[in-house]
Amino acid sequence: MLSNKEGQAIPNVTFHTRDNDEWKDVTTDELFANKTVAVFSLPGAFTPTCSSSHLPRYNELAKSFADNGVDDIICVSVNDTFVMNAWKQDQAAENITIIPDGNGEFTEGMDMLVDKNDLGFGKRSWRYSMLVKNGVIEKMFIEENVPGDPFEVSDADTMLDYINPQAKRPDTVSLFTKKDCPHCARAKQLLDEKGLGYEVIELNKNVTEKSLNTITGADTVPQIYINGQHVGNADALEKYFNT
């Protein structure tokens, strides 16, 4: 259990998936043959670390992976295809190929199937990541075998650093908006034109104008942050790009 399989071929498995409300079998050969693939595997969809950190960061860094020769990023979990598809939609993880290992065959073949009965999960995957080239595992990052759910080495940044220590990360952009705001739409257009992805934080009953003022010091939207720096409104964003 928890074996490092660097230099070995991945297990030969057929995954049973749903695509456009139809069953579709996908083989490991289709996923890995003649490709460089970054894989990360985790205990379960909709679980805290998986949803807050593991999946989102791989999705966020997808372009950086592509720029450094990775053809696809695959997330594997011992969940059924309905759960995995719902999780992908909930996470807006359009840059990730989600693979349901519902029977645990791939995970067992990787020697990563563990007992999570204490949580009521049954058999699940240990958390790990790997770089696979043409079906052969080049590098694995396996979380330490300790109690709980360690998350120290299988993250996206560790994998990207392995592939290229000088790899450029995308700018981190957060955009405070509210519905039907024309200036917010202009800010989004400016960001889209620059090819920058961004997180949208929309004012609602939980994120109020008081919250906006407390965080940004401003009373109007949009308010934009880039790499932790408060840029300001749409006019300020245009000036930021021009300079």
Image (spheres, rainbow, N blue to C red):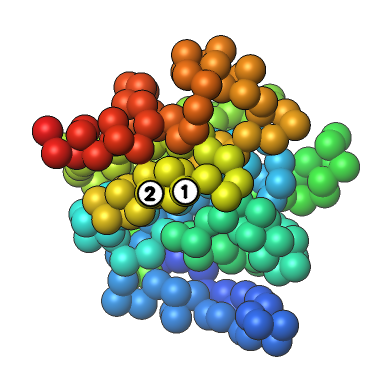
Tell which of 152 and 220 is nearer to you: 220
At a point 35% along the width and 53% down the height, the residue shown is: 189
At a point 57% along the width and 75% down the height, the residue shown is: 13
Quarter of the image containing the N terminus? top right
Is residue 107 visible in this depiction of the protein?
no
Drawn side of residue 14 relative to residue 196, left or right? right
Quarter of the image containing the C terminus? top left
The local secondary structure at tag 2 comes to: helix
Amino acid type, residue under disc 1 in the picture: Pro
Residue 211, numbered label:
none
Amino acid type, residue under disc 2 in the picture: Arg
Tell me if mark 2 has few (under 14), some (14-19) or many (20+) residues whose alpha carbon lies within 10 angstroms of its own. Answer: some
Residue 186, numbered label:
2
Residue at image mark 1: 182
- Write down the quadrant of residue 2 in the picture: top right
**Contact between labelled residues 2 and 1, with CB atoms less than 8 Å apart:** yes
Distance, label 1 to label 2, CA atoms, is 6 Å
Tell which of 15 and 110 is nearer to you: 15
At a point 49% along the width and 75% down the height, the residue shown is: 28
- Seen in the picture, residue 224 relative to 219 is either above or below; the reply is below
At a point 47% along the width and 48% down the height, the residue shown is: 182
- Seen in the picture, residue 105 relative to 41 is either above or below; the reply is below
Is residue 178 visible in this depiction of the protein?
yes
Drawn side of residue 92 relative to residue 38, left or right? right
The local secondary structure at tag 1 comes to: helix
Tell which of 35 and 225 is nearer to you: 225
- Seen in the picture, residue 11 relative to 33 is either above or below; the reply is above
Image location of residue 115, percent across then percent down: 76, 43
Image location of residue 150, percent across then percent down: 58, 28
Drawn side of residue 175 relative to residue 80, left or right? left
Image location of residue 114, percent across then percent down: 70, 45
Tell me if mark 1 has few (under 14), some (14-19) or many (20+) residues whose alpha carbon lies within 10 angstroms of its own. Answer: some
